[in-house]
Amino acid sequence: MAPERPGRPRTRQRGFVEVRWRQFRNAPRPIVRAVVSSLVIATVLGLAYLAYDVALDRGAQLPGGDLRSLFVAIFVVIVLAGGAVVTYVLVPQPAGADRSGRPRRTAWSAALGFFAAVPIAYLVMVAVTQLLKPLLV
């Protein structure tokens, strides 16, 4: 701990939960954009999967038969790629713009979106299959 300066009150040590809550409330905008873009893509595709899954469970005869496994694989690929692309487009580097005044974008913006999309894809698929589907079937 740093030595105290005369005339300044001692700063209060924050607890773990209080620090995490403050970080959650003041998240950096690039992170919020990356998570929200992946969440929107995953939610739309997750609801489409839910509709397909419920239709098959209710006995609908759809062309191609039961393609749920393929749908899940395509879901994951689209959420990861879509999260990376949308974040690349929406999130400029925090260092500012280049000399022409355009915001800089690098592969790091896409990597941020990709890695933000990994848990989002998993959580949305779990929410759809384990929470929403039992309510509809």
Image (cartoon, rainbow, N blue to C red):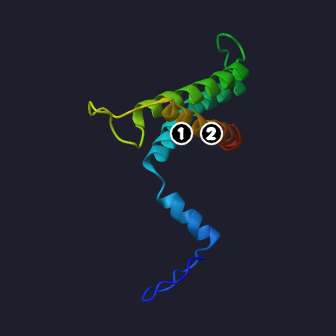
Instruction: Work out whether residue 37 or residue 114 is closer to the camera in this orientation and state it.
Output: 114
User: Of callouts 2 and 1, which one flags the residue occurring earlier in the amino acid sequence?
Assistant: 1
- Where residue 133 sits in the image (x, y, percent)? 67, 38
Which residue is found at the position 32% from the left and 33% from the top? 98
Which residue is found at the position 71% from the left and 13% from the top? 65
- Where residue 41 sits in the image (x, y, percent)? 52, 32
- Where residue 61 sits in the image (x, y, percent)? 67, 15
Mark 2–mark 1 Cα distance, whole angstroms, equals 8 Å
Can residue 59 be seen at all in this image of the molecule? no
Which residue is found at the position 72% from the left and 17% from the top? 66
Residue hosting label 1: 39
Mark 1 packing: few (<14 Cα in 10 Å), some, or many (20+)? Answer: many
95 on left or right of 35: left
Residue 99 in the image: above or below residue 60 = below
User: Tag 2, which secondary structure?
Assistant: helix
Instruction: Work out whether residue 110 or residue 17 is closer to the camera in this orientation and state it.
Output: 110
- Where residue 124 sits in the image (x, y, percent)? 62, 39
Instruction: Work out whether residue 124 or residue 80 is closer to the camera in this orientation and state it.
Output: 80
Residue 131 in the image: above or below residue 83 = below
Which residue is found at the position 60% from the left and 37% from the top? 115
Residue hosting label 2: 124
Q: Quadrant of the C terminus?
A: top right
- Could you tell me if the residues under marks 2 and 1 are in contact, i.e. CB atoms within 8 Å? yes
| Res. 16 image quadrant | bottom right
User: Tag 1, which secondary structure?
Assistant: helix
The amino acid sitting under disc 2 is: Val
- Residue farthest to the left, as pictured: 100
